[in-house]
Image (cartoon, helix red, strand yellow):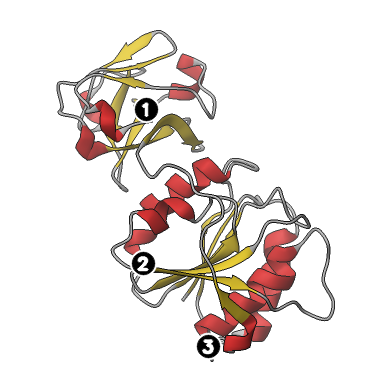
Amino acid sequence: MLILFTDYGASDPYVGQIKAVLHCDAPGIAVVDLLHTVPNYNAHAGGHLLAALAKSFPVGSVFLCVIDPGVGGDRAALVVEVDGRYYVGPDNGLLSVIAQRAGQCRVWGIDWRPDTLSDTFHGRDVFAPVAARLATTGLPMEWLSEAGLAVSFDMADLPRVIYIDHYGNAWTGVRGGLLDRDAKLRIRDRELVYRRTFVEAEKGQPFWYVNSVGLIEIAANRSSATELLGLAIGDMVRLSGSPDSRLH
């Protein structure tokens, strides 16, 4: 299985170009669009989203992960094996959160380059062919060299808004296990209480809850919490009832 995780969006041609390579190089392999609206250029938010979303996929899955504002520069290209799943992407911190939380992790640099290489689209020309080979025949060892992560974000939970979905719900980088249900969440001078489900809140009432991938999310019943509270990617959340040592 090949899983795509990018900031390419759905209205531009980039995802289609990636899929063309995958279907040519890995025919018959299922391709899953996990997320193409990771906040633009934001490898830090992407790293926490990836760590939350990837755990539902089976061992042996290959993730093609591209949030790559440094494309064409001196950042390295990586293959990272984490607990039996493979991640292909840039060495800019995007793969570092899931790698540091792993029970088992190995890292390789990608030395291979195609004969024709765009300066600005390594997702198509480098990462997609490598991911396709990983999902099918495997990679020739001469394509790789042992490496480490040159850029690593703190693996502690991130108390910021890292994603806003089309409902206006704001995902944070904090895992739900850190808080008891009496805890309060403060954002933009508003203090929010916990609700287990949307129907436990009054219509239009903002609240926090633990979403389906285990992250603390800010929502409102049948309304946009983002519009009600004026939220944006990167907004800090302050939490009561959480051990500060686990947050940064």
* Percent position of residue 246, x then y: 28, 35
Total numbered labels = 3
Q: Quadrant of the C terminus?
A: top left
**Which is more foreground, mark 2 or mark 3?**
3
Q: Quadrant of residue 181?
A: top left
Q: Quadrant of residue 98?
A: bottom left
The structure residue drawn at horizontal position 24% and vertical position 29%, both measured from the top left corner, is: 199
Q: Is residue 162 left or right of residue 72?
A: left
List the residue tagged with mark 2: 57
Q: Residue furthest top?
A: 189
Indicate the amino acid at tag 3: Gly
| Depicted 148 relative to depicted 213: above or below | below
Q: Position of residue 47 (x, y in %)?
A: 48, 48
Q: In the displayed structure, would residue 189 be above or below residue 3?
A: above
- Residue at 76% of width from left, 62% of height from top? 121
Alpha carbon distance from label 3 to label 1:
43 Å
Q: Residue at x 46, y 30 (%)?
A: 161
Q: Nearer the viewer, mark 1 or mark 2?
A: 2
